């Protein structure tokens, strides 16, 4: 790192001519002339490396003290290189233009990073930003961060906080999402417990409300199992709650063809490179983009950045093509039955929720090159579901329906 | 003589209070790292330097470094860094 810095700021190898070179070195040290790599020449002179600013100081010290003379042995670094180019006007103009364009590009947004979002997709936030005039290629100077942040909060109500941090040509958007409001238990809202699925009730426990079904009853989906209206005394409406367990039955089928097409990769790969300037794409190849008849295409976008982290307005696009041939693959009926049975079992478990499978039976049929597996299962599960009553339902319950 | 007595008194005080001498009293500090790096603090200048011998003047003593391909990597009015193949460091009072 030190050598890179020296190359950038320029350095010189100097020789101090003095009868006693130790004295010259000590004078330099006392006058705060920074130097390194001090050696003695066979003639007895001191040679040292100094930076450009230290060289100026060294010349001044030599003039003031008169104790030694300074001679440059070698000079190196960017300032000397540029000095040699001082008469090559076109080159200097190109260099100045390059520096100007690099500086100019830093006032435009070339990258937007969204962090902190978990449920709200980044695409939604980026679309909202675009609606407020914040997008790739837009000038940073025209953006008022606080105003944009306030308007984004109005556009996306799921967000509780947003801040825009401008790092040159990179815009960092940090968001925080609102916590979902928990479902509150309100005892004053008339609520009933209804059947989520059809089945035969095996057990019913009412913590609040009036049971309208009993073990052994057959219920359909949507039937009220625990009523809100409690007909004791003058009667009252409650927030009914409890659990209702029932025997339920399922029948579901899945099909699978015994012959499928699969990809067999040949191992042949090809890469294509292109550059993206803003929205413009420049292909760095002459032949057609897709080299194979059947192939997968994997595209990787890579933002080009300088070592300091400054984002350049150029994106390198790398397309990788992997050739494959379509191969007909035969599946045995047993294998198909095994795969379908596993999928059906998983589907059943997802549908049951809180409960268990009492018994299950698989039936397999094969016709026209298709394997069909049917699952029939008997389960025991919780089917009660709380739901607030409508005004009509409340009126119906008060009128004596259902009866205790 | 008086200055020498004052210096000794300060040294005594720093010993009583466990104070590092190189911090306020200008006592030289010589740090040798491996066999290729010598760091001298609070020096008073070079008396001799060459690829085989470097002698630095310090308050109350001389530090003589012997070795091969010795080079002064950096130097300021307070610090001195010597690199090369160090064979020995000698303190001459």
Image (spheres, coloured by chain):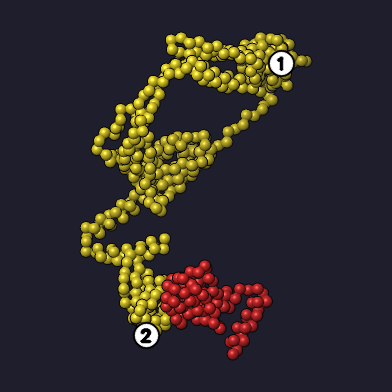
Chain colours: A yellow, B red
Relative side of B32 to A329, left or right: right
Residue B9 in sight from this viewpoint: yes
The quadrant of the rendering that contains the N terminus of chain A is: bottom left
SS at mark 2 in the image: loop
Chain to which the residue tagged by mark 2 belongs: A
Residues at circles 2 and 1 in contact by the CB criterion of under 8 Å: no
Q: Earlier in the sequence, mark 2 or mark 1?
A: 2
In 3D space, how far apart are the residues under numbered discs 2 and 1 (Cα atoms)? 111 Å
Please give left or right for residue A117 compared with residue A232 in the image: left
Q: Do the residues at pointers 2 and 1 share their chain?
A: yes
Q: Nearer the viewer, residue A113 or A386?
A: A113
Residue carrying label 1: A203
Task: Give the residue at x 39% y 53%.
Answer: A307
| Picture residue at 61% right of the left edge, 73% below the top | B20
- With B69 as the anchor, is B91 left or right in this view? right
Residue A237 appears anywhere in the view = no
Q: Secondary structure at mark 1?
A: strand
Task: Judge the density around disc 1: few (<14), some (14-19), many (≥20) Cα neighbours within 10 Å.
Answer: some
Check the residue under mark 1 and report the chain it is in: A
Residue A394: quarter of image: top right
Residue occupying the point 40% across, 44% down: A111
Question: x and y percent of residue A216 in the render?
Answer: 70, 10
Q: Quadrant of residue A110?
A: top left
Position of the C terminus of chain A, as image quadrant, is: top right
The residue indicated by pointer 2 is A19
At horizontal 37% and vertical 36% (from top left) the residue drawn is: A299
């Amino acid at each position: 790192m030190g050598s890179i810095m020296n190359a950038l700021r320029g350095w010189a190898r100097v020789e101090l001519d003095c009868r006693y070179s130790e004295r010259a070195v000590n004078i330099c040290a006392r006058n705060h002339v920074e130097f390194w790599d001090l050696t003695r020449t066979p003639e007895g002179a001191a040679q040292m490396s100094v930076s450009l600013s230290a060289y100026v100081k060294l010349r001044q010290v030599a003039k003031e003290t008169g104790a030694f003379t300074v001679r440059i042995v070698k000079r190196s670094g960017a300032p000397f290189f540029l000095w040699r180019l001082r008469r090559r006007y076109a080159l200097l103009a190109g260099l100045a233009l390059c520096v100007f364009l690099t500086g100019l590009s830093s006032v435009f947004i070339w990258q937007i990073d969204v962090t902190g979002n978990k449920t709200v997709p980044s695409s939604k936030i980026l679309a909202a930003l675009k609606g407020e005039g914040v997008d790739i290629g837009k000038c940073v100077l025209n953006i008022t961060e606080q105003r944009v942040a306030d308007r984004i909060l109005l556009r996306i109500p799921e967000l509780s906080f947003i801040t825009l941090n401008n790092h040159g040509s990179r815009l960092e958007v940090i968001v925080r999402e609102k916590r979902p409001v928990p479902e509150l238990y309100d005892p004053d809202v008339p609520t009933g417990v209804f059947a989520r699925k059809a089945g035969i009730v095996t057990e019913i426990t009412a913590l609040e409300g009036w049971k309208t079904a009993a073990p052994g009853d057959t219920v359909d989906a949507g039937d009220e199992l625990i009523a809100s209206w409690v007909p004791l005394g003058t009667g009252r409406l409650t927030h009914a709650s409890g659990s209702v367990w029932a025997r339920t039955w399922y029948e579901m089928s899945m099909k699978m063809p015994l012959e499928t097409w699969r990809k067999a990769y040949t191992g042949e790969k090809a890469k294509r490179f292109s550059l993206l300037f803003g929205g413009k794409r420049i292909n760095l190849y002459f032949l057609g983009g897709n080299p194979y008849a059947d192939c997968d295409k994997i595209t990787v976008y890579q933002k080009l950045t300088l070592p300091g982290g400054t984002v350049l307005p150029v994106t390198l696009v790398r397309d990788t093509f992997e050739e494959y041939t379509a191969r007909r693959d035969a599946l045995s009926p047993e294998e198909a039955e095994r795969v379908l049975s596993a999928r059906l079992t998983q589907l059943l478990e997802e549908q049951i929720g809180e409960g268990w499978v009492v018994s299950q039976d698989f039936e397999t049929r094969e016709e026209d090159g298709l394997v069909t597996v049917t699952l029939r299962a008997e389960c025991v599960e919780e089917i009660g579901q709380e739901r607030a009553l409508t005004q009509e339902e409340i009126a119906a319950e008060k009128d004596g329906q259902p009866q205790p | 003589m008086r200055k020498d007595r004052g210096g000794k008194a300060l040294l005594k005080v720093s010993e009583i209070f466990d104070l590092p001498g190189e911090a306020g009293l200008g006592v030289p500090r010589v740090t040798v790292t491996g066999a290729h790096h010598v760091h001298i603090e609070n020096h008073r200048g070079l008396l001799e330097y060459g690829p085989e011998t470097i002698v630095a003047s310090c308050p109350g003593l001389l530090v003589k470094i012997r070795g091969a391909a010795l080079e002064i990597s950096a130097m300021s009015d307070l610090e001195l860094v010597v690199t090369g193949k160090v064979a020995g460091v000698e303190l001459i009072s």
